[in-house]
Amino acid sequence: MDGEFRTSFVREPGALRHHPALVLNADYRPLSYYPLSLWPWQEAIKAAWLERVDIVAEYDVAVHSPSTTIRIPSVVVLRDYVKPQRRVAFTRFNLFLRDEFRCQYCGSRGELTFDHVVPRARGGVTSWENVVAACARCNLRKGARSPARAGMSLRRPPRRPSAEELRNIGRKFPPNHLHETWMDFLYWDAELEV
């Protein structure tokens, strides 16, 4: 058997690479909602073996060594609490998340770019308070003018979001795959229907 094939098979067994573990903080909340805090199954097993996490739920799939069989964790909780970040980094992703992946002029969810409300050519700065998500069509239409001069209006004025706000917005965008063992931990703090 080819050595390279054997090595890649051992590192990435096809049937198992699709079993990520949901990572919860010590308070049983996900470290992040968007992107959802997930570890590859190998990292989850390693952390459990090193006693850094407790396994809360498992898949019906196991991995084997010559002397041990371990079921793959589907939910793990950190033993030590990780304090959430208070400061939100000004990144393209966080800006799009703040604006819920919508153009702040027309509301479309198409291919987004970002726009300076007060154009840089007119002294506008690149900051939370002056940059919004915009589709290419609206960005081109507005150009180097203010929204008022371009006959456009903002859906919401731009502002600096808090870390908690971004976490809550991120909960609106679940990933494509949610394992059933994760559901009790992803929406446990949602308001119950009466």
Image (spheres, helix red, strand yellow):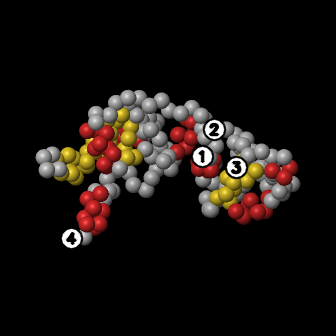
Q: Earlier in the sequence, mark 1 or mark 3?
A: 1
Question: x and y percent of residue 34 in the render?
Answer: 50, 46
Q: Nearer the viewer, mark 1 or mark 2?
A: 1
Tell me the SS state at disc 3.
strand
Q: Which residue corresponds to the image point at 26% horizontal and 38% vertical from the top-left?
A: 49
Task: State the separation of the CA atoms marked 4 and 2.
Answer: 55 Å
Q: Earlier in the sequence, mark 2 or mark 3?
A: 3
State the residue position of label 1: 94
Residue 8 shows which numbered tag?
none
Callout 1 environment at 10 Å: few (<14), some (14 to 19), or many (20+)? some
State the residue position of label 3: 132
Q: Which residue corresponds to the image point at 29% horizontal and 42% vertical from the top-left?
A: 46
Question: x and y percent of residue 61 in the render?
Answer: 22, 52
Decide if residue 91 is on the left or right side of residue 80. right
Decide if residue 39 is on the left or right side of residue 98. left
Question: x and y percent of residue 193 in the render?
Answer: 44, 38
Task: State the separation of the CA atoms marked 2 and 3.
Answer: 12 Å
Q: Nearer the viewer, mark 4 or mark 1?
A: 4
**Towards the viewer: 128 or 142:** 128
Are the residues tagged 3 and 4 within 8 Å (C-beta)? no
Question: x and y percent of residue 114 in the render?
Answer: 69, 54
Callout 2 environment at 10 Å: few (<14), some (14 to 19), or many (20+)? some
Task: State the separation of the CA atoms marked 1 and 2.
Answer: 9 Å
Q: Amino acid at mark 1?
A: Asn
Q: Earlier in the sequence, mark 3 or mark 4?
A: 4
Tell me the SS state at disc 1.
helix
Are the residues tagged 1 and 2 within 8 Å (C-beta)? yes
Q: Is residue 55 visible?
A: no
State the residue position of label 2: 161
**Towards the viewer: 123 or 22:** 123
Callout 3 environment at 10 Å: few (<14), some (14 to 19), or many (20+)? many
